[in-house]
Amino acid sequence: MTIARKRPTETLFDSPFFVRFKVKERLGDLIPPLVAITIFLILWQLFSWIPGVILPGPYRVVRETSTLILYPFYSKGETDKGLFWQVLASLQRVTIGYIAAAVVGISLGIVVGLNKILSKALDPIFQLLRTVPPLAWVPIALATIQKNEPTALFVIFITAVWPILINTAVGVRLIPQDYTNVARVLKLSRNKYFFKVLFPAALPYIFTGLRISIGLAWLAIIAAEIVMSGTLGIGGFIWNAYQNGQVSEIILSLIYIGVVGLLLDKFMCWLQTAILPEG
């Protein structure tokens, strides 16, 4: 007697299109955060309905900031611009200050990492300065430089440089001695030793500092722009919204800040993976 075997039931996700683009796996990664965000928004809305609570709920935020959401590219004046231009202005400052911090931090970190005496002498200073909050640098920078734009760039630089410098120095100090011995046996020149041994070995630590610093740089520009009045940028936008009592606009700006910060971190993560596939 022949026993008929039941064919496995095919679902929509088993079709070639969904299999090719791994839709099922992507949905598995996407659904949990969507559920968590939905629950958060519901709890936030319920909290806003409690008597005496001033914080607007999600529905009110969307309703009161619908123009900003729908028209992020509008421009009516020097500082009266949509959130796209506000974020872009802040990102431009972050890019300049961050690149300067990366160049100085990596260069000085390598020098300090190679010189034990210099490392012991400067390490207490580095550890002291890296703990100073970004906002604390603004008054002394304004008093010294007396111009908003250079002050903002300095605050970004001085906040972002320390993680890059310290991690680079650590990476250089932790280069295995075997690498150095092999370089001596092969009689590599200083340039070849730097590009073939030292820099590649320290690169994972350098990227760790770069990833930390990009987040700090983004936080620093927000703090600097809040203090400096009349400056185009997301920090100045938040300060103006606060002075006008627009709490919903502040919340929308915080969402923009969080999203941009997340994208910056993801970009650095992607860059690290592209350069260091095994890292």
Image (cartoon, grey):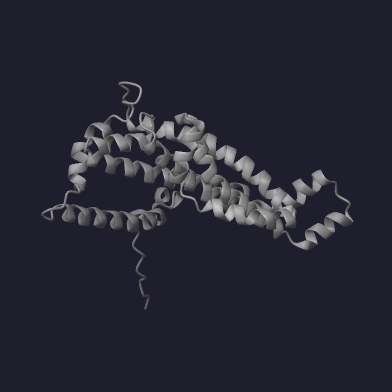
Residue extending furthest toward the front: 143
Residue visible at 39% across and 56% down?
Answer: 29
List x then y, in percent, for residue 47.
18, 56
List x then y, in percent, for residue 111.
72, 48
Say if 44 sits above or below 234 in the image. below
Q: Is residue 11 among the parts visible in the rendering?
A: no
List x then y, in percent, for residue 90.
43, 35
**The C terminus sits in image quarter:** bottom right
List x then y, in percent, for residue 93.
48, 34
Q: Nearer the viewer, residue 158 or 8?
A: 158
Say if 77 sits above or below 232 in the image. above
When asked about the image quadrant of residue 244, the answer is: top left
Q: Nearer the viewer, residue 103 or 141?
A: 141
Q: Is residue 71 among the parts visible in the rendering?
A: yes
Q: Viewed as shown, does residue 171 lie left or right of 95?
A: right
Residue visible at 45% across and 43% down?
Answer: 220
Residue visible at 45% across and 45% down?
Answer: 136
Residue extending furthest toward the bottom: 1
Residue visible at 57% across and 55% down?
Answer: 127
